[in-house]
């Protein structure tokens, strides 16, 4: 059925096009604005306001929420620049992030490839490998701190039992090992989610590509390199972005297992922020580091995605 | 019409009835952040009796214990108060360094008025009152729950069997630790990972090397950490780690781990205060076998425990029941409660005022009282300002783990001290 838009003598029944556009867009915008208002209000209250408040605090000498703060200009930014622990913890944050992407992301990919080859036991292993992700990071920290205990821990006892006691290390006391050791615990908790994402990605790869590769005589390694990994490109981009953001947010395991020690060897930017804000009550400097961390997250994610987009093109 | 009249009458009668029941009209709840060991039956017995007695003395009041999730040291107190999830009154680790943090952030209320109107001034040692009243321009923000006395805990049977004893000079102490090491044991157990226990060891080493007068000047900023006396204390920690008297792997151990080593008799000596008795009991260690000694010092009269105000009651600014909270603290300071706590099987603290004729249930407490009677030195963990506390703990880890030299460590610590 066609709508009647003209009279018998051919006159256009519709309003002039410009007026229609104007009225329509006004009505549409008004309705959209009203519908979006609750979301905008919530976003403003719970996201925008804290962000703006943090930026404001970074320019003050705030010693806590109950204290009067005065404007100090760029003092906190200059202090951050002069503080060697800020730079050390920044470097360790990048190291932490790298460890997390490789350990958690890598393990997630390897296990996804292994689990997807299973048929009858696939659900069992998928569930079993995902289970650590359901455990709170703080609890994971306590468990792994006990595993690493140099005198009573699982690793120390096992090595001693099999006559390799000399291989035992100060997992949490050696400054060169500590960040890696803590990251293993954190990655153990995180790999399950990445594994599930990879499994979902694997299920979306067209099976005919494997059949074609087999007809061409490709072996397993060639199929992995030329079919599977290219097929996972989008999932991999997402997983790496997610792992980088999760890596930047790393806090609980470090706080529980080492408290940033020994002698700042595992201090990352988030644990230093907590120490400044809640132990030393130096909210100004802590706010500067929060802004720095947020900028880092934005820059790293945007840069990585642009790089991936360029590669794909 | 009749139905409306009847309903109005019933509503009026109900309201009058509610107002007539005093318990409902005046019901108040006091949330208390006290011990974190309520899961232990003996500890629960003590605190539940205190709760029942306070409720009986204050009809209509219900005391609710909040399980504490931390202290000022780990930021939990600050986080709880700032997020308005704190209790009405709390017991936490204290000392000028820690208390300054929450005072400066305006997280706790001044209690100065109560020291006069509730007579608290006369319920603590005069010297303790003098210290408290000199810290914040005359304002007092805490009420000490007990005084700490940190020394060396050893196994009586082990030491008797080998003919070992703690005492004499520093050289004698070194010789003893060498014998312990030769016997295949860890001489000293310390868990500096979460700060406090490293501070217990370091405070004792500083006390032995510098004495309490010098350390008093150091922690108050009148003397530098880099001066020869405190520097010697740090050098001795490095020296002991190098000689294997303190295993460098202990830099990654927490206090619980170090306690476990001592309780299982894998280590000979542990640094701690009388609160350690509670942990030993929880670990089913025979309390009669606990020995307490002070660290040997080459300075005459300076072989004494370190300590100061260990734990204090405070009222958060977010407290919904500040007057009732003050009543609770007053109740805790009463003779009956202090005696009950001191003579209870879990009694493991030195009262904040003279309590004659106390008969502690745990025998070793007699030795702790005797050691503290000679005076208590400074535990820097509770005296250094908040800006330097974390560096102090990190430096101790670095000294034990061999990451920093004594001179560099002390210089880093000094850099964090505010100008005198």
Image: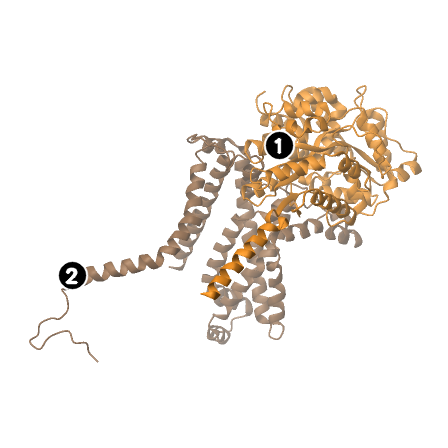
Chain colours: A brown, B orange
Residue at the limit of the structure toward the front, as seen here:
B2
Q: Quadrant of the N terminus of chain A?
A: bottom left
Q: Name which residue lies at 27% across and 58% down.
A: A29
Is residue A107 visible in the rendered image? The answer is no
Q: Nearer the viewer, residue B298 or A159?
A: B298
Q: Position of residue B381 (x, y in %)?
A: 67, 31
Figure label count: 2
Q: Nearer the viewer, residue A248 or B287?
A: B287
**Label for residue A67?**
none
Q: Position of residue A109 (x, y in %)?
A: 55, 61
Q: Position of residue B385 (x, y in %)?
A: 61, 28
Is residue A250 visible in the rendered image? The answer is yes
Q: Nearer the viewer, residue A133 or A154?
A: A133
Can you identify the residue that label 1 sits on? B99
Q: Quadrant of the C terminus of chain A?
A: bottom left
Can you identify the residue that label 2 sits on? A18
């Amino acid at each position: 059925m066609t709508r009647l838009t003209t009279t018998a003598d051919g006159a256009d029944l519709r309003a002039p096009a410009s007026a229609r556009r104007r009225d329509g867009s006004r009505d549409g915008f008004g309705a959209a604005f009203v519908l979006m208002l609750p979301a905008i209000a919530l976003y403003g209250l719970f996201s925008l306001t804290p962000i703006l408040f943090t930026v404001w605090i970074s320019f003050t000498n705030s010693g806590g929420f109950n204290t009067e703060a005065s404007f100090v200009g760029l003092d906190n930014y200059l202090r951050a620049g002069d503080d060697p622990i800020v730079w050390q913890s920044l470097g360790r944050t990048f190291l932490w992030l790298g460890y997390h992407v490789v350990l958690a992301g890598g393990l997630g990919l390897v296990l996804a490839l292994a689990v997807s080859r299973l048929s009858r036991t696939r659900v069992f292993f998928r569930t079993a490998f995902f289970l650590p992700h359901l455990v709170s990071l703080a609890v994971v920290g306590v468990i792994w701190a006990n595993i690493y205990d140099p005198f009573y821990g699982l690793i120390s006892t096992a090595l001693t039992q099999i006559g390799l006691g000399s291989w035992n290390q100060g997992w949490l006391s050696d400054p060169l090992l500590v960040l890696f050791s803590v990251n293993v615990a954190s990655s153990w908790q995180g790999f399950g989610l990445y594994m599930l994402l990879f499994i979902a990605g694997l299920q979306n790869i067209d099976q005919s590509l494997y059949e074609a590769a087999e007809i061409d005589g490709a072996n397993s390694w060639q199929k992995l390199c030329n079919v599977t990994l290219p097929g996972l490109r989008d999932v991999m981009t997402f997983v790496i972005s997610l792992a980088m953001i999760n890596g930047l947010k790393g806090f609980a395991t470090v706080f529980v297992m080492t408290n940033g020690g020994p002698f700042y060897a595992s201090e990352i930017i988030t644990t230093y922020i907590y120490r400044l804000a809640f132990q030393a009550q130096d909210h100004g400097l802590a706010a500067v580091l929060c802004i720095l961390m947020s900028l880092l997250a934005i820059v790293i994610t945007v840069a990585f995605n642009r790089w991936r987009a360029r590669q794909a093109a | 019409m009749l139905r409306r009249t009847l309903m109005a009458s019933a509503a009026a009668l109900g309201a009058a009835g509610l107002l007539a029941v005093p318990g409902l009209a005046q019901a108040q709840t006091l949330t208390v952040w006290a011990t974190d060991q309520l899961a232990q039956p003996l500890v629960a017995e003590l605190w539940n009796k205190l709760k029942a007695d306070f409720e009986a003395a204050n009809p209509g009041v219900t005391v609710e214990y909040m399980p504490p999730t931390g202290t000022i040291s780990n930021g939990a107190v600050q986080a709880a108060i700032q997020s308005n999830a704190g209790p009405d009154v709390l017991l936490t680790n204290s000392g000028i360094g820690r208390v300054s943090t929450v005072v400066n952030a305006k997280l706790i209320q001044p209690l100065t008025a109560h020291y006069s109107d509730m007579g608290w001034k006369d319920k603590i040692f005069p010297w303790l009152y003098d210290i408290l009243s000199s810290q914040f321009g005359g304002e007092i923000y805490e009420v000490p729950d007990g005084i700490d006395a940190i020394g060396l805990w050893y196994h009586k049977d082990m030491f008797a069997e080998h003919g070992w004893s703690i005492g004499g000079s520093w050289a004698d102490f070194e010789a003893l630790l060498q014998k312990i090491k030769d016997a295949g044991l860890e001489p000293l157990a310390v868990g500096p990972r979460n700060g406090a226990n490293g501070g217990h060891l370091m405070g004792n080493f500083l006390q032995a090397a510098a004495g309490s007068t010098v350390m008093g000047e150091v922690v108050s900023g009148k003397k530098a950490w880099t001066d020869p006396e405190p520097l010697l204390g740090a050098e001795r920690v490095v020296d002991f780690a190098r000689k294997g008297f303190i295993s460098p792997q202990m830099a990654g151990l927490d206090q619980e781990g170090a306690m476990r080593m001592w309780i299982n008799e894998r280590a000979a000596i542990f640094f701690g205060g009388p609160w350690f008795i509670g942990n030993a009991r929880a670990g089913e260690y025979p309390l009669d076998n606990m020995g307490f000694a002070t660290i040997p010092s080459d300075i005459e009269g300076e072989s004494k425990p370190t300590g100061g105000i260990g734990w204090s009651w405070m009222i958060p600014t977010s407290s919904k029941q500040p007057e009732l909270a003050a009543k609770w603290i007053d109740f805790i300071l009463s003779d009956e409660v202090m005696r009950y706590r001191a003579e209870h099987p879990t009694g493991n603290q030195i009262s904040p005022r003279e309590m004659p004729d106390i008969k502690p249930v745990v025998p070793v407490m007699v030795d702790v009282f005797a050691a503290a009677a000679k005076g208590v030195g400074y535990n820097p963990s509770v005296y250094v300002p908040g800006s330097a506390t974390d560096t102090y703990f990190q430096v101790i880890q670095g000294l034990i783990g061999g990451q920093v030299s004594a001179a560099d460590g002390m210089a880093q610590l000094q850099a964090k001290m505010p100008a005198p």
